[in-house]
Amino acid sequence: MFSESIVTTELSLVSNSNSSVYFISLSTNDIQLTTAVIEETTSNSTGLWYNRPMFSPCALWNPNATTFADQSTLGPYTHGVFIDTYNTLYAGSWWNSLVKVWPNGSSTATRTIQAGLYQPYSLFVAMNGDVYIGNGGSNGQVDKWISNATIGTGVMNISAPCCGLFIDTNNTLYCSLSNLNKVLKVDLTSVSSTQVMIAGNGSNGSTSSLLNSPFGIYVDTDFTLYVADSNNHRIQRFGFGELNATTVAGATAPGTITLNYPTGIVLDGNGYLFIMDTGSYRIVASSSAGFRCVTGCSGSSGSTADKLYNARYMAFDTYGNILTLANIGGGGSSGEVWNGWSHVKSKDNFRGCGNNIGMTLQKNDMICTYRASYYHPSFDIVKLNGKSGGGSFSYDRTKSKEEVYNAFVEFIEKQIAAQTE
């Protein structure tokens, strides 16, 4: 029944010869590999260096998971995943400022790309094996790493992180600037490196020509651009040369599916969509039979084998497996109580690559809404008792959650007292 080895760091896994689905869901600071057996055989699109397997419209996935690795393997706050047609896996860590590479069948990374990187966000591998990394968090550029290079070279200057990267069959590089609400492209064969804005205009909006926090991107072989327009809860399709998009998934596209902060998108070999519906903790897909949920279909998040938590990046391997990367953020959970303050709301608002969390604490008639950053040990107050709040509370990561929150609610009470003076 089983035939192909799957890269793993904690246990030996094999893939069903009829294909399986795999995804990483980072919860309680662990990276998990979720496996699910698909009941139909797959074939792959030819002529590409990345994978686009073909599935039956009746393909089914088992929802249960197995742990792939914890953060000791790659580190927390993972960003970017790519799998080539040799099943070489590339995955990045924002926290450790690196990208690791696992060859097919190996449980040990054989290459680490690190020198010159600082908090990378996304990655894509070209047909010739060059690795492109969105090194724009602080360095303001996309870097190219050739085989066995010890340092990367800049190929694209950017003023915000690329939350998504893609290279099409004409060797054109695409970058989605979530914080700037636009998608840029640059011809990698041109010496001028002139950037062209091909989607959005830098202002957020919901019309056909505007985007609001575009995240994952995908370019079809006919150069149609697909954008996960996360804060508009939709998938936008831009035909080649077109600045006005058609919504192909989301509540505003009748007959499709309702999405909640989608952040990742890939196409299979038949041109059907696979969407990381991050805010609903699931992967959904289209087919000739319409849209359906693929995995994480309970509608709730969690760390059990059948659930996803903030999964965002995904890629196919040659067998139809899907590997996804996810992140967790700071902040508490609904129902927790700290010195009389109860968490009454815990809701992701997926702002840009940083993916902050908006949360609410309440004590009697006192209410505080705050944001907890994924990447910085701080809580930013948004509202206090219905009024616009201010102030940022920084904490020590070495402290326990109880210590952090007891100190934070004390900080809140001081801010409220200052409001009434």
Image (cartoon, rainbow, N blue to C red):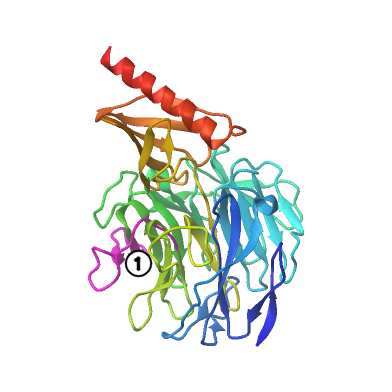
- Residue at the image position 58 percent from the left and 29 percent from the top: 396
Quadrant showing the C terminus: top left
Label 1 neighbour load within 10 Å: few <14, some 14-19, many 20+: some
Total marks shown come to 1
Q: Where in the figure is residue 238, as x and y percent of width and height?
A: 34, 63
The reply to whether the magenta stretch includes residue 242 is yes
Visible residue check, residue 199:
no
Q: Is residue 322 above or below residue 351?
A: below
Question: Where is residue 381 drawn, in percent x and y?
Answer: 37, 30
Which quarter of the figure has residue 369? top left
| Residue 187 shows in this picture | yes
- The boundaries of the magenta stretch are 235-264
- The three-letter code of the residue at mark 1 reads Gly
Residue 294: % across, % down: 44, 73
The foreground one among 24 and 180 is 24
Quick check: is 197 in the magenta stretch? no
Residue hosting label 1: 239
State the quadrant of the N terminus: bottom right
Q: Secondary structure at mark 1?
A: loop
Residue 218: percent from left, percent from top = 46, 64
